[in-house]
Amino acid sequence: MRYSALSDVRVVDLTHYIAGPYATKLLADMGADVVKVEPVQGEGGRGLGPKRGSGDCDRGGLFAFLNLNKRGVTLNLKHAGGRELMTALLEDADLLVENFAPGTLAEFGLAPDALLEKFPRLSIVSISNFGQDGPERDGRLNDLVLFARGGWTFPVGEPNREPLTPPGSLAQYVSALYGAIGAMQAITARDLGLGRGQHVDVSILEATVATMIYETVTFQYTGALRSRAGKRFAVGPFLIVTLRCKDGYAGLHCVTDKQFEGLCDLMERRELAFDPRFDTALNRMINNDALLEIVEPFFLCHERRWLYQEGQRRTIPLVPIPSVGEVLEWEQTRARNYFETIDDPALGKIRVPGTPLRLTSHRAEPSRPAPRLGEHNREIFGGRLKLSDAAIKALQQAGTI
Amino acid sequence: MNTIFDAKLKVLDLSMGWAGPLVGQMFAEMGAMVIKVEDTHHFDWWRGSLSMAPAEMQPIERSAVFNTANRGKRGVTLDLASPRGIEILRRLIKVSDLLIENFSPGVMDRLGLGYDAVSAINPRMIMISMPSFGSDGPESNARGYGNTVEAMAGVTGLTGYHDGDGQHYTLSNALGDPVAGLHGVFALMVALRERERSGRGQLVELAQVETLIPFVTEGILEHQFIGKAPMIRGNRHREHAPHGLYRCGRTDDWIAIACETDVQWRSLAKALALDHLLDDKRFADAQTRKANEDALDEELSRALADTNLDESVKRLRACNVLAAPLNSAPAVMGDPQLQSREYFVPIERAVVGTHLYPGAVARMRETPLSADAPAPLLGEHNRQVFREMLAMSDEEIAELESSGVIGSSPRQYRAAS
């Protein structure tokens, strides 16, 4: 789904893989005019995600999602002609978003400082592993290594075996959000009186650490370090735990006194709320193991759905843990028309998450599928940059577009 | 202009926990004047419980997480169960730009402050509602916090060991909260721009669970294309091996190692004196390494068992293998790259003293974000805010205090709604 709130914002999108493309997708979903610039062989992330259909399919499913609502052109930035076109695109752009290794833009003759001088209204958002400076600026990362280094993995998993890394590329998406917010911050500052654009530098490592406040700050306050507590989030003055039940798993988030009283009521063990082992948050922390021993067998002999209904009836945050397939079929997402069906030119009909932001100032419109490689070359180079058909053809033959 | 908003933007933050407060905190980073509104009965539950320490210790001023997520705000209290408390809130709404709330659906309506009422007081007000599962739909009243939101988004169902018995694990950082908060900031920035154009405010709605579901899109598509749930891979990768966490030495030191190419694998084997594995057919390429990953992991575990963590990380990085220590909190704070960029910022705050807090993420040279102001004590800025924003007299403020409409000491803790 897309809104047209940012229809006056022009974005030149030099991003690839996940963190950059999700940042520009957030802008595109809000109506920004995003022109995705790919090398002539396509960006590295075109193959991301599962595929289906014919062998010449130019995209994986994740690419098809991450690049909704963008237009696509190709440009060889190693050609002088390619750089010229790039410069022409930046002429009236508000934002250039990129997630290359630091220094790459300069190698393309697009050094950020020079661009800012040449195009005073332009802002540049750079998302990189470690930021644009520092001793490890040029270092490499992947998700496993990032989560370990940034502190997300340390407290997760069974105490008697290796720690457990979070699934997928979660921190890439988190970084994308900081990038999209950075883009809005830069154009807001410009329009509120600064009058010129600026360079926004987002480090994926810092974005990861920013979203892990439990550990870094709490440790300084108390000296206590959370250790791996298995199915529990931690041993604390609460019971936040993933519990096996009769037909799967349920998640319990029991923090306040009221939630604990609700849990006791659910288990028909109201006396536990007055039990000296559990009557205060502090005591529930001291006797956390004993509490878990009481709760576990109760969950084991009940079904997820019953636990969810009866728990929620007592206002306990207690949920069945769904598979991704169940998320797709959940009556709540269905009732809110959250998932959107895209008729993708290569993959056919796919259901993908819609925009999570609901503006009331605009009507949501259906998303446009991710562009084929160079799909909008003619529209952008001919329409916006006013190149003749012959000139476009020559660029094509030279391998510039 | 030193900051983006130079205190000209006024934000009312009625939210609790992390998701909503993070929105206010990030607007404070941009130089907005952010007013955190609490109730001496229903103060922010992230302050913790009064039972955690004797009253003279001020336990609710010692919450590391509250003190992080509410930095840079002015703190006021209002008894929202009393008509006078609501009346003062309405006066604050009249002179503010943004309103952040993450109550359960219906609470603002019960206070008489649903969006229509808010808009009638101040048509330029932009209000953001951040319920867990949405303001409509059959499950809109279900309770969810960070970890349960994370579960309903499908994240928990994907988290487990590759050889586990089906047990799922919850992430360590209640990811649903900061992700919802970041979306909230983005949405409000968009709505502010829209207000510049139209002159009107609006209601923005964001269901926390819906902000996190996109992060598992790959699994959702896999389910559609293949017809079954994606495999739970734990520390392993779909295509590459080795890819995991291995113990170094006899303590709880672990190293994360990933090889994405054959070249990296050969460098790794040489660096760990595992040259004999280079001719081993089981490990010749990514495909065979994946097929024999248990044996491969055993070899690596043995080779790393007697090494020193820091030396191993250094040695592997030197030959371009992806490697990092499993960092605990103090190790994260000592990370040389983070230190070099002065990521953590020192803040002195009443009751708890000086500590380092995570800084603003986006680095902007012209209008730098500042995350270095402390979180307010309960009701700390009552006097200042009511005097400056509502032109109240000292007598009026004193009267509100004595009648219990405002205050600065907590009353008996009750759960937040």
Image (tube, coloured by chain):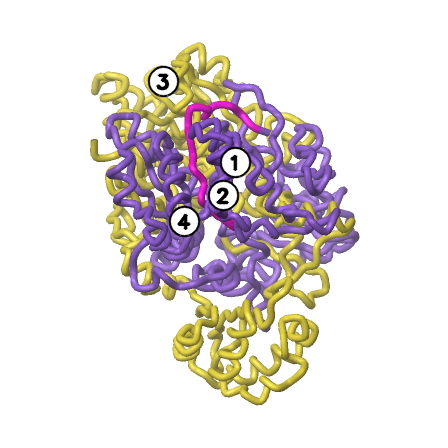
Question: Residue B167: horizontal and vertical position, in percent?
Answer: 68, 60
Amino acid carrying label 3: it is Ile
Amino acid carrying label 4: it is His
Q: Which residue is disc 2 drawn over? A: A401
Mark 2 vs mark 4: tell me if same chain: yes
Q: Secondary structure at mark 2?
A: loop
Q: Which residue is disc 4 drawn over? A: A79
Q: Which residue is disc 3 drawn over? A: B88
Q: Secondary structure at mark 4?
A: loop
The residue mark sitting in front, 4 or 1, is: 4
Question: Residue A194: horizontal and vertical position, in percent?
Answer: 24, 30
Disc 2 vs disc 1: Cβ atoms closer than 8 Å?
yes
The hue of chain B in the figure is: yellow
> For mark 4, does the 10 Å Cα neighbourhood hold few (<14), some (14 to 19), or many (20 or more) residues?
some
Question: Residue B220: horizontal and vertical position, in percent?
Answer: 68, 46
What is the letter of the purple chain? A
Q: Between residue B345 and residue A16, name the one nearer to us.
A: A16
Question: Marks 3 and 4, Cα distance to the nearest angstrom?
Answer: 64 Å
Residue under the point 45% across and 40% down: A13
Question: Marks 3 and 2, Cα distance to the nearest angstrom?
Answer: 61 Å
Q: Secondary structure at mark 1?
A: helix
Question: Marks 2 and 4, Cα distance to the nearest angstrom?
Answer: 10 Å
